[in-house]
Amino acid sequence: MRQETNENKMASLSDDRRLLVISHMPLAYAMAWRMKDCGVSLDDLRQEGCLGLCEAAMRFSDELGCRFATYASHWCRKMMLRAIRRSTATCSLEDETLREKDEDDDPIRHAQHRRIDDALLSLNPQQRMVVMMYYGIGTNGHSLTEIATQAGISIPRASTIHRQALKRLRTALNGQRLADYITPSGE
């Protein structure tokens, strides 16, 4: 079924957009490789990444102010994370009950997650990508050097984008730092 959806999306793209998708498939495959140990098969992650590329190609405009690879990485990651969540949702009833209990036990944490999600929407796609990668939101944390390399920008530019995004987030979070909301992975 997903294969059919992918073919339908590719068919709806113009030739130049289709070429854009095909030329950026190594990006989707690399992202799938980094997420391969999350409970979804590598082939499924690659497929989701290709769907993300198609979605990005349909929505991309030069007026966004970023390269296609930067924009597409957001959509690829989104589609892969959706597949991971779908896979996780098919766990046994006992696991689901435990997760629901954990969420119900900590309404403050749940509210914090909702505030972070809302604040991230105030950022442009490039700023959102840098912040999410840097703080490990939805992925493992990366250094600014790794982010710059992946996004195809200079390290000083990645640092500037990060700084600007944090100013916007601070405003959206009423002066609190994003780090105040994030629990280190060891806790």
Image (cartoon, helix red, strand yellow):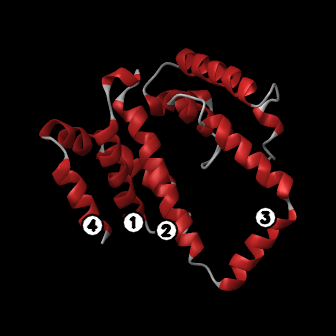
> Quadrant location of residue 23?
top left
Q: Position of residue 160 (x, y in %)?
A: 60, 16
Kindly identify the amino acid type of the residue bearing the numbered disc 1: Asp
Residue with the mark numbered 1: 44
Q: Residues within 10 Å of mark 2 (few under 14, many from 20)?
A: some
Residue with the mark numbered 2: 40
Cβ–Cβ under 8 Å for marks 4 and 3: no
Q: Is residue 178 above or below residue 168?
A: below
Give the secondary structure at mark 3: helix
Marks 2/3: CA–CA distance: 23 Å
Cβ–Cβ under 8 Å for marks 2 and 1: yes
Residue with the mark numbered 3: 103
Cβ–Cβ under 8 Å for marks 1 and 3: no
Mark closer to the observer (2, 3): 3
Marks 4/1: CA–CA distance: 10 Å
Kindly identify the amino acid type of the residue bearing the numbered disc 4: Gln
Give the secondary structure at mark 1: helix
N-terminal-most mark, 2 or 3: 2
